[in-house]
Image (tube, coloured by chain):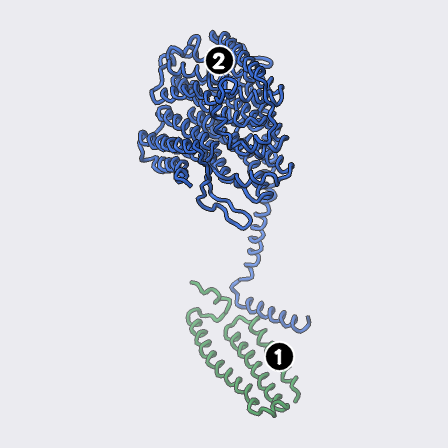
Chain colours: A blue, B green
Amino acid sequence: MNNVFQLVWLIPMLPLAGFLINGLGRKHLSKTMAGIIGSGVIFIAFLLSLYVFFSVKNGNTDVAHYFDFINIPALKIGFDLQVDQLTSIFLLIITGVGFLIHVYSTAYMHDEEPKDFAKYFSFLNLFVFSMLLLVLGGNYVILFMGWEGVGLCSYLLIGFWFKNTNYNNAARKAFIMNRIGDLGFLLAIFWLVNKLGTVDFRDVFANVSKLSTFDITGITLLLFVGATGKSAQIPLYTWLPDAMAGPTPVSALIHAATMVTAGIYMIARSNILYTMAPVTQTVVAIVGLSTAILAATIALKQNDIKKVLAYSTVSQLGYMFLGLGVGAYTGAVFHVMTHAFFKALLFLGAGSVIHAMSGEQDMRNMGGLKKYMRITHLTFLLGCLAIAGIPPFAGFFSKDEILGAAFAKNPLYYGIGVAGAMMTAFYMFRLYAMTFLGKFRGTIEQEHHLHESPRAMTIPLIVLAILAVIGGWIGIPEIFVHGGHKLEAFLDPVFAQGNAITVKNELAHNTEYMLMVISVALALVALLYAWKKFSAYQKAEKEEAGLGKVLENKWYVDELYDAIIVKPLRSIATYLNNVVEKKGIDGMVNGVGKAVNYSSRQIRLLQSGQVGTYVLLMVIGILVLFIVQLFL
Amino acid sequence: MEIRYYISLAVALFCIGIIGVLTRRNAIIIFMCVELMLNAVNLLLVAFSKMHAATAMGKAFPGMVSDAQIFVFFIMVVAAAEVSVGLAIIVMMYRNTHSTDVNFLNRLKN
């Protein structure tokens, strides 16, 4: 073990320390101190992550064992932190983007009370801590600890403004949806323990051949259920758009750096299991693709600026799962990275807009912000170009890699994927045009208040915008530059086992060029159409009808869940509460009480205080004893 | 004389005692009935002692023959002491309450 790994434990521990200091001292810390502590620990963690990254780049990977977490004869689970290529990439994303979001938050949350401010930062730090634990964990149990941690923190942060009932409901929804998924994850861990007696990544992946096909399929499907909860895929995606209730930087953190990427990470980590379970792979690909399309269609008609971004995240996550499903693990991780850049950028940009609009989130009341907010406008435009997949911005390379792999697997995947990409370009530029172009449609007071955000907010935007532009260049396809895909070479050791048994359909170069041209051309068409259509947007008086209405109401999925799951459950609960609980259980408990009460009231009469009665009873008792003795 | 006559007499005396204790309310009479029960037991002890003295066991251990009779003396002495205390209590009660009715005396409070 070289000294890198003696430092690794500091990376998660620093945010934890920040959490404790800010959380416990929230009543005594000034806002400045809370902000410095909260951002500072993440920054140091980022520097350490950089150090770890370069060390890993030189070929050092290892697992650091700290102590035995569970140690019983049949099962030994160590508190292990694993550092390899995949982990180091995620460490950089989490701490890097996380740090920018922390800095941004210091300005965005400035109107809060000092103690709420410190509480907010302590939650953010805990969030980052959980996520770091998740990606550093050397076995499924440590991963699961982080996994639960991010679920808890998402609950705390989505419900940060807990005085609003709707926000609390959104927080609960996120937590419950995640719990459903977590159950699947937990079952998968039990299954692994049962079959292999270990949860350690290295042991599991080394012994994977001992599992039957049925076991692998079952385990991977259950793990995938966990991933659908955490990474917001069909059928458990509905929590993510509702999670917009939290402060905007939190949305950025959830969508870009932490939480939703957990599912991708977990599947990428278990790539060998998934490669050996083709059935699951197909399921993953189909679920990912359907989510990508479904969320994209919903995003077309949303009017809340954050909702559009939320559905675009769900949609982009769908692409990542498509990538995982077709075996393009590198592509999926690449997309996680580029997505982290541009989605954090877009969310923080949206936060900047909302900040300027004094809390207004409805795009119908925006417009023309271009001339008031130059930096936000420019960075936001770059983010939109990146997510729309226009070269040479980051999103193009990663999305193209996934789509290329999808085409190799099944051209139908590619067709649907490109349709989704077109919609992405459309709704992103609808968002852009409605917000920044045209005339201002809000009230005069709002117009008066419009201003560019403070520097603590614009600098993270600029940094993220640069990353969103150049972030894709570490994964340039082979056909452009030989050896250009540095990320693939870097991640190769992690995916080597999976790649070794994957049947690769190599695409001809011509096909690959053609696919790129098609997807870019279609995205451009959609982009220009949206630009043209919405740059002169006027508030429509008439309600949407037909398909538009269905889309605006998110395909009525929430209502559907409400009708088929929530309502029946609630009526069963009401029945249990009113009938079984009140008459059955309460009746039993009260009955016992009443019986004791009644009988004691009767028996009490015996103790009358009359000595004669006592003596009589004594004599009767003796006589009974005699009779028993003599005759029975 | 046969032992069962003694037993019958003792049981009769004992039952009279019990019935007296149960039915009467005057403390002095209850006290007398208790004495009656004690003496019924004494009578039995003496009778059995006398009976055993005639058996083979009594012949083998002549020292044991008088044991039960010594018990009786003990009981009589203890009973005499108890009577003196008991009567003293009853007299004190009578002085305070002008009654020896046990039902009236059951309220020890106040």
Q: Which mark is residue A496?
A: none
Tag 1: amino acid: Val
Q: Please, which chain is the residue tagged with disc 2 on?
A: A
Q: Is residue A366 above or below residue B9?
A: above
How far separated are the C-alphas under marks 1 and 2? 115 Å
Q: Please, which chain is the residue tagged with disc 1 on?
A: B
Looking at the figure, which quarter contains the C terminus of chain A? bottom right
Closest to the observer, B60 or A45: A45
Q: Is residue A267 above or below residue A525?
A: below
Residue A282 in sight from this viewpoint:
yes
The kind of secondary structure element at disc 1 is helix
Closest to the observer, A472 or A97: A472
Where on the picture, by quarter, is residue A274?
top right
Tag 2: amino acid: Phe
**Residue linked to disc 1:** B11
**Left or right: A299, with B56 as reference point:** left
Where on the picture, by quarter, is residue A587?
top right
**Left or right: A320, with A357 as reference point:** right
**Residue linked to disc 2:** A429
Q: Is residue B80 above or below residue A610?
A: below
Residue A163 in sight from this viewpoint:
no
Bin the neighbour count of mark 1 within 10 Å (Cα to Cα): few under 14, some 14-19, many 20 and up: some
Q: Position of residue B95 (x, y in %)?
A: 42, 72
Same chain shared by disc 1 and disc 2: no
Q: Position of residue A97 (x, y in %)?
A: 41, 26
Looking at the figure, which quarter contains the N terminus of chain A? top left
The kind of secondary structure element at disc 2 is helix
